Structure formats: C-alpha cells, structure tokens
Amino acid sequence: MISHSHLLPHNSFFSSKLRLTKPFHASPSFSFPSSSISMSSSSSLHHTPNRTTTTTISPLSVALSDPNPPNSTPTPLRIAILGFGNYGQFLAETLISQGHTLLAHSRSDHSAAASRLGVSFFTTNLHDLCEHHPDVLLLCTSILSTENLLKTLPFQRLLRNTLFVDVLSVKEFAKTLLLQYIPQDFDVLCTHPMFGPQSVSSNHGWRGLRFVYDKVRIRGDRSRISRCESFLGVFEREGCEMVEMSCADHDRYAAGSQFITHTVGRVLEMLKMQSTPINTKGYEALLGLAENTRGDSFDLYYGLFVYNNNSLEMLERMDLAFESLRKELFARLHGVVRKQLFEGGETHKAPHQHIDASLDMIRSKDVADIKYEYKVNDSLRLLKIGIVGFGNFGQFLAKTMVKQGHTVLAYSRTDYTDAAAKLGVSYFSDLDDLFEEHPEVVLLCTSILSTGKVLKSLPFQRLKRSTLFVDVLSVKEFPRNSFLQTLPQDFDILCTHPMFGPESGKNGWNGLSFVFDKVRIGMDDRRTSRCDSFLDIFAREGCSMVEMSCAEHDWHAAGSQFITHTVGRVLEKLSLESTPVDTKGYETLLKLVENTAGDSFDLYYGLFLYNPNAMEQLERFGFAFESLKKQLFGRLHSLLHKQLFGNDKETQVMLETTGLSTFR
C-alpha cells in the first residue's frame, strides 16, 4: 500500500536554477541541477551512483562506441507492451514502423487492433507473453492500475536482465513502484512522452515534441547500455526533443505546467464555454484547452494530483491567486461605493429619458448573427474624423485611417504632437479648437474609467448638430447608456468594439472581428452613408464585421473576454515560467499570461465593473473551481476511508449517519 503523506507540500516550486553546462557530446545544452533523491533500494544500482542529477535538453547523447548511432538502421528490439489501449496502440504504430517486434497484453481484448498493426496479442495469460523473453517491457497502464499490474507480473518467466520502461505522467510515484516491485537484476527506465495522439495529430508527427527520461537503474555492461540507448533512439529518430532529468525534477516542473494546465482546462470545461461571434484569439486558445482536457479521463487528472507530491501546493497557490484577484476587484468596487455614499462621487445611472424599444436589451437566444456585408465602392467617401484620446490605441487606428485618405484630427490630455505629426494627424491641445473644425465623426478612444468624465467635459455646442459619435470600448452597454444620457438628441451614435489591438493587429486586420451596434443613426441618406463609410474603414482592411446589440455583446464578452482576462490574471499571480517539460497546452497558458500582463488592471476592472454579466461569470468560475477541488478531495477521502476501514458496510453506515463521509 502506498502512503499519501507525501501530498503535504514540502518542496519550494521551481527551486532549481538554470545554468549552462557542456555535456560530453558536441551540442550545447541547458542543465537544471536538482536535489538528489536517495533510496536504499537503488542507491548502489543507479547507472551513475551518488551523482548530482542534471536536466539536459539536447539531442540524445550517444556514446562514441555505440554500435547503433541515431542515423543508422536501428537494432531491432523485442518490446512487450502491457496496457494496449489508445496510448499503447499509439506508440506501437511507430515502434512497428521502425522494425521492432511487438508483443502486447491488456485486460480488454484488443486482438483485432493488434492484428491490424502487426502486433502479437496475448489475451489472458501474462505467463505466455513473458516466456517470449522480450528485451523491453513497456508499461502503458493508467496511473491508478500500475501497482496492481506489477503485483501480478510473473517476473520468474522473464530474463533477469529485462529492461522495464513506464510512460506515466508522474515520475516519482512510478520510480518508487518499479524499485519496490521489480527484482534487483532488472533495469529501470522512467520516461514521459510529453505528447499523445491528439497533440501529434495537430503537430503532424513527433518532431519537436519533448520526451523526458531518467535512467533510474541501468547496469554497466555494454549490452544493457546499448539496449537502453536503442529504446531512447526510437523517439530521437522521430525528431523528439530528448530531455534527461531526475524523476523528482520532472514532478516539480510538471506540477507547475501539466497539473495547472489540466486544472484550468477542467475549470473551463465546467463553465461549458462555447464559441461566440466575438471570439478573441486568447478565448479560442482557452476553448481549445477545454476541448483537449475533455478527452482525458478524470482518473488521469486525479492521478496527477495524488501521485505528484507538488500538486497540492500548486492547487493551494491557484486557490490563493483567485482569492487575491477577487479581493482586488471587490476592494476597488468598495472604494467606488464609499466615494458615492460619503463623498458625493459620480454615479453611473441609466438614462432617464424614454428610449425606443428597438434599443432595449436583448439576449443571445433572441438574436441571429448578422454580418455587415461590405461592397466595394469605387467612390469612397472620405471623412474628417476627430479622435479624442490619442494614446496607443488612438494612434493605432489613426495610422490606418490616414493611409486610407481620411482627414484625422486628434486631442488628448497628454501632448502627442510629435506622434501625430509622424502619422500625418493634426493635433489640437484645446478641444474647443478641434470641435470648431467640425469633424463629421468624433471617435472616443478613452479608457473605460475616464469615459463618463470625458463625455461631460465635451463642448458639444462647437459641433455640427448631426455629428456621429463612435466609441471603441471593450464593454458596450455602459457607453451606449452614457451616450444616450449625455449626448444631445440630434447626434448620431455608433457603438463599436474592434476585437484586436496594436499587438494582435500589428500584421493587419484581415479576419479579425469588428463588432458594432447602430444605436442611433438618422434616417436621411447623408447620415446613413456617413455611418457606412466609417464602418468601411474596417471592412476594407478585411475585418469580420459583426452587427449585434450592445447587450448581446456584453453577454458574450462576459463569457469570453472577461473569463480570458480572469484566467490570465490568476495565472500571472502564480509567476509561471517556461520549464523543460512544457506541453502545448501550458505554452498556450504562458502566452495568455504574457498578453494579459500587457494590459492595465484598470482595463480588467472596467470589464468587471461596467459589464453587468461579469459578476455572474466570476461567481461561476469560483463555483467551478470549488467543485473541482471537491471532486479531488472526495476521491482522496474515499481512498483514505478504504485504507482505514476496507469495505466494512457497518462502518460506512456509521460514517454516513454521522455526516463524516461528506465527499463519498
């Protein structure tokens, strides 16, 4: 029976420091020193006794005397796969293609699949398979079933120098089991291919994907060393990035990459996230992560939690990070409320005037996705556009507008005279002066938090009464209501949200979404033509034009944009770093953190405060995370109960009666 006391966090996360080393082959490599793990059962049997373990990220080191270098024809091995499910078959296909002889056994009958692959399948009797004396015995069992399999293996039927290899996602647990159950004469190689059928399909092969290994116990004679190198050569020949590291290092890194990736994926899966008409690239990445996680069993995730002694610490850190983020949001909200109550601060009320029913809030189920169809118009109408707020985003939009031939004027609290001159924009330090130029369109590029104040300070009397006002905020109900409340009735209103920015749009806008709502556009041809001419700016650049109500936008955005920012900010608080065992999913999360870190907390707070659906999404995220933790600790409770009491029905009834079996 394996004790679970190691679940208590006792290792500091990412304690290893990066240093450069010079391995004995020509290629440069990175090395990560790790704490040595001493085990009485194996201390004298490691292939390099009493060594300081290093993580080597490089092409596989092959001794000069190796008779079978990677580019030559491989020495065929006789490999027995125990556990011939999806993953066993996945590996078998490549092993067969390289000319190795394969035997297989599984609890389920996979004889038909084995026959198709050219594998000899043994249905019931492990003794028969072992008597064929495989060179390598490859364990492709689940984390939870590995110990039971090892207990039933007829080791006496195998040659005493057989090499045992596992491919489990946790390594200290696998190493401990193998050293505990396998006789001393057998060799032990712990490995973790950091990929599966899904990731290989999207990657079009194994090239560039990581393969982690630890030569736990390889005897020193040439035949054993050569056999181990031949097995590792299977993966190097397919182009894998070979990473040698201790099992302890693997688990420490994997708790911060693999376990966190699965945790985020499962939380997102519980939210039942769906694609929306206004997906961002970050949200699409999260959808992909949730989809990949959905394909893995809960047993796999539970195994990552129970059998990696660093996972509990990471779960606790993620819990604290989410709580910290929630406290930041509520503290800012509390400050706003106090200011309103005790200092007579500005409140954000809905407009009191009557608003036409056609502008009322509508939910997604009532609205069809309407695409704005852009038709090429040779007689392009050029506009005079006044940009209020000429920071990064204002300059980003101005560049394209000027390129298309529009006249652009700009104003900002900060002096951007030089930046405006470089772009060909007329810059005004006084809003009255700009408005007296009578721009046809006033484009607000201010922050969410400053929009209300800016609107109240605008000298509307300087403008023509038919001016079109446009915003580009990430929330839409708030500016819509502010416009309707503040702007004179004669002014037109167009609410928009370019679903991109200077970073995501730096290589062009083609295919990027542009959301808009014609909140109030006069019916005469001149006004409708002006509105369409402004929209044409984005359509001409190839944007996907999405027309939807402001309410509809905010309903979708709370489930996509706000959740994306929330996940990014939670992970940012964990100070995640790239590791030698990064998966594609973890790299997605690192990229999300990088993008989120570039946005101010004010933007995130604005998404929370001014989107009426954001609070619900924050609560749903919290509930999903709590539910996932209950599932994990519920399984752990059941396991502990079974260890303590077995299947004693009387004891179980007593526990249920007293309410002590909460999670069963």
Image (cartoon, rainbow, N blue to C red):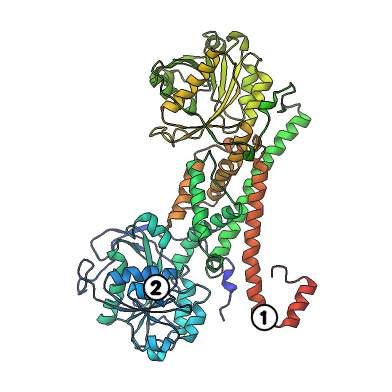
- Measuring from the top left, give residue 69's x and y in whole percent: 22, 69
Q: Nearer the viewer, mark 1 or mark 2?
A: 2
- Measuring from the top left, give residue 102's x and y in whole percent: 33, 77
Looking at the rendered structure, which numbered label has been put on residue 113?
A: 2
Q: In which quarter of the image is residue 562?
A: top right
Three-letter code for the amino acid on which mark 2 is drawn? Ala
Give the mark nearest the N terminus, 1 or 2. 2
Structural distance between the alpha carbons of marks 1 and 2: 41 Å
Left or right: residue 347 versus residue 22 is: right
Q: Which residue is farthest bottom?
A: 156
Residue count near mark 1 (Cα–Cα under 10 Å), binned few <14, some 14–19, many ≥20: few
Looking at the rendered structure, which numbered label has been put on residue 644?
A: 1
Query: In the picture shown, does residue 106 fall above or below 605?
Result: below
- Measuring from the top left, give residue 165's x and y in whole percent: 39, 76
Disc 2 secondary structure class: helix
Residue count near mark 2 (Cα–Cα under 10 Å), binned few <14, some 14–19, many ≥20: some
Q: Which of 445 and 478 is in front in this view?
A: 478
Q: Quick check: can you spot residue 325? A: yes
Disc 1 secondary structure class: helix
- Measuring from the top left, give residue 440's x and y in whole percent: 52, 13
What residue is at 55 percent from the left and 68 percent from the top?
299
Q: Nearer the viewer, residue 542 or 433?
A: 542
| Number of numbered discs visible in the structure rendering | 2
Q: Nearer the viewer, residue 345 or 607?
A: 607
Q: Nearer the viewer, residue 356 or 312?
A: 356
Looking at the rendered structure, which numbered label has been put on residue 15?
A: none
What residue is at 49 percent from the left and 85 percent from the top?
151
Question: Split into 4 quadrants, where in the image is the N terminus?
Answer: bottom right
Q: Which residue is farthest right?
A: 657
